[in-house]
Amino acid sequence: MALNLRQKQTECIIRMLNLNQPLNPSGTANEEVYKILIYDRFCQNILSPLIHVKDLRKHGVTLYFLIDKDRRPVHDVPAVYFVQPTESNLQRIVADASRSLYDTFHLNFSSSIPRKHLEELASGTLKSGSVEKVTKVHDQYLEFVTLEDNLFSLAQQSTYVQMNDPKAGDKEIEEIIERVASGLFCVLVTLGVVPVIRCPRGGPAEMVASLLDQKLRDHLLSKNNLFTEGGGFMSSFQRPLLCIFDRNFELSVGIQHDFRYRPLVHDVLGLKLNRLNVPGEKGGMKSFELDSADLFWSANSSLEFPEVAVEIETQLNKYKRDVEEVNKRTGGGSGAEFDGTDLIGNTKHLMNAVNSLPELTERKQVIDKHTNIATALLGHIKERSIDAFTKKESDMMMRGGIDRAELMAALKGKGTKMDKLRFAIMYLISTETINQSEVEAVEAALNEAEADTSAFQYVKKIKSLNVSLAASSANSASRSNIVDWAEKLYGQSISAVTAGVKNLLSSDQQLAVTRTVEALTEGKPNPEIDSYLFLDPRAPKSSSAGGSHVKGPFREAIVFMIGGGNYVEYGSLQELTQRQLTVKNVIYGATEILTGGELVEQLGVLGKKMGLGGPVASSSSSGH
């Protein structure tokens, strides 16, 4: 059976809401207990896409509060806490217990609580004489946000800036790597699988992969092993493959405009935690939810926007026909008369009509919702020429360049400052050789549009650095000097930003990540991936690095992007499962899910940190 992360995480949360008791087949506890739920902001974001208020009621949760809000005592009622194991949260729990706010305390931490914090919790409750109030302490390993069945985010903001910050020391980099590896460990515990790990050598991907491999090995040796898939060496058809990449592996995908429904809704309307707000007809904002419960969204989110508009129209016409049919049968339509003689027949039609009403009402709500969203999108598309940016960027990547007149026309035409900045960066990435006068003209156009050029300058600097690296590769001494200087100045991102056009889009416009994942899951010799690191946490350490028995093919894959993922990559990997025979299911995750604008903001922060723009600004990007 295919791995379903959303289902697994929801099951863990429901068990937690039922005081970690075993559940009966209907998904509820045998004995219903009314309780209060206390969470922090991070855990609220974990719950938000998975559990609605009616679900909380179903599992006996009558009240729910943020941990940092002032709360009144509610005696004789147990409280379920779901929080990160931070110092401030633990102090608050100790304070709540000492004030006897609730009858009993069921503590659930989103990740493994460090021993130091556990000791602080014990001594704090002992001192206040409230230790007997704490019934259970659980490590839940749920420190990630699941947005769809096969999509998750670790919700770790600005990781791209932190990993590539020229001023970041070893200690800071190690802390980030530890955070990312711990988040991935939580995902694997929730899925209950120990994967085979592959990644490119060098950089953040290898650092995360090696640490995660070590975490899994250590855990498999411990007594309370959380992985229930059975020991021994299972065949690769039953074990998933975990492919880890760094955003610099294919930077362009994170920046380019896209014309498919899901990426467009995310990029233009700011889809966050599966929710978005669009302007209503009579002023004000309307809030909508887009998840697997919305069948129109599930079926059409990967289509190009014009196809979605046609589909909305089709659904609306079908709905009108069905309503007309119901009216006809019940005598409410034009020209239909109620025939008193056929009382049984009329009653039957009436019953059918009544039964079909809820379904028709629901369909109308879905059609109205997507009509609202499509209308809002269309306004932005026309105003900003998003379709033109998408086409020109795609052509640039295919051809490895663009006609100068076309380039300047796009930069001086419609579009926001950010649209033009993204387009200019895509121009830099797609051209193999930099034409100095052309680049100066692009910079002048960006300045004229009053765009912040820090991100453009950053990518240009990295690009020119790569050119000088390539030019000096014959002279190894000077090359190593440049590398040393570059490593100090640019952190991780040396050869990355412009790994060349070939690594951006192949002729059939398949993303490099998708192409690589396809090759890795097939498990056949392939020069593109033969140098990739191979780690199998279940194999003896000596054999893991090279000749392991688990070579593939793999039915299931988990693809993880350090530094920010996006809906374009997610869509591309889901399409892979449709058209390819080997891999049947791909779960995609990232440190955060970013729009093109949010990633460019992070590039801009790096540019400023290197003195390539105005004053250093803190990153305002906030992906999922």
Image (tube, rainbow, N blue to C red):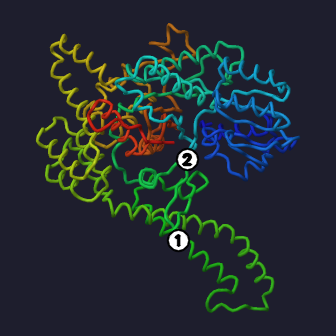
| Image x and y of residue 147, in percent | 56, 44
| Image x and y of residue 560, in percent | 48, 32
In the foreground, 540 or 373: 373
Q: Is residue 98 above or below residue 69?
A: above
Discs 1/2, front:
2
Q: Which one is earlier in the sequence, the residue at label 1 or at label 2?
A: 2
> Tag count in the figure?
2
Q: Is 158 left, or right, of 65 in this rendering?
A: left
Q: CA distance from mark 1 to mark 2?
A: 28 Å
Looking at the image, the residue that sits furthest to the top is 542
Amino acid residing under circle 1? Leu
Judge the density around disc 1: few (<14), some (14-19), many (≥20) Cα neighbours within 10 Å.
some
Residue drawn at (71%, 14%), measured in percent from left and top? 223
User: Looking at the rendered structure, which numbered label has been put on residue 417?
Assistant: none
Residue 27, quarter of the rendered image: top right
Look at the numbered disc 2 and give the secondary structure of its residue: loop
Looking at the image, the residue that sits furthest to the left is 437
Residue drawn at (35%, 31%), measured in percent from left and top? 248
Residue 81, quarter of the rendered image: top right
In the foreground, 167 or 159: 167
Q: Is residue 514 above or below residue 205?
A: below
User: Looking at the rendered structure, which numbered label has been put on residue 273?
Assistant: 2
Please say if the residues under marks 1 and 2 sit with CB atoms less than 8 Å apart: no
Which residue is denoted by mark 1 in the rendering?
Answer: 316
In the foreground, 71 or 426: 71
Please identify the quadrant where the N terminus is shown. Answer: top right
Residue drawn at (51%, 16%), measured in percent from left and top? 549
| Image x and y of residue 480, in percent | 23, 13
In the foreground, 497 or 278: 278
Q: Is 10 left, or right, of 577 in this rendering?
A: right
Look at the numbered disc 1 and give the secondary structure of its residue: helix
Q: Is residue 347 above or below residue 448?
A: below
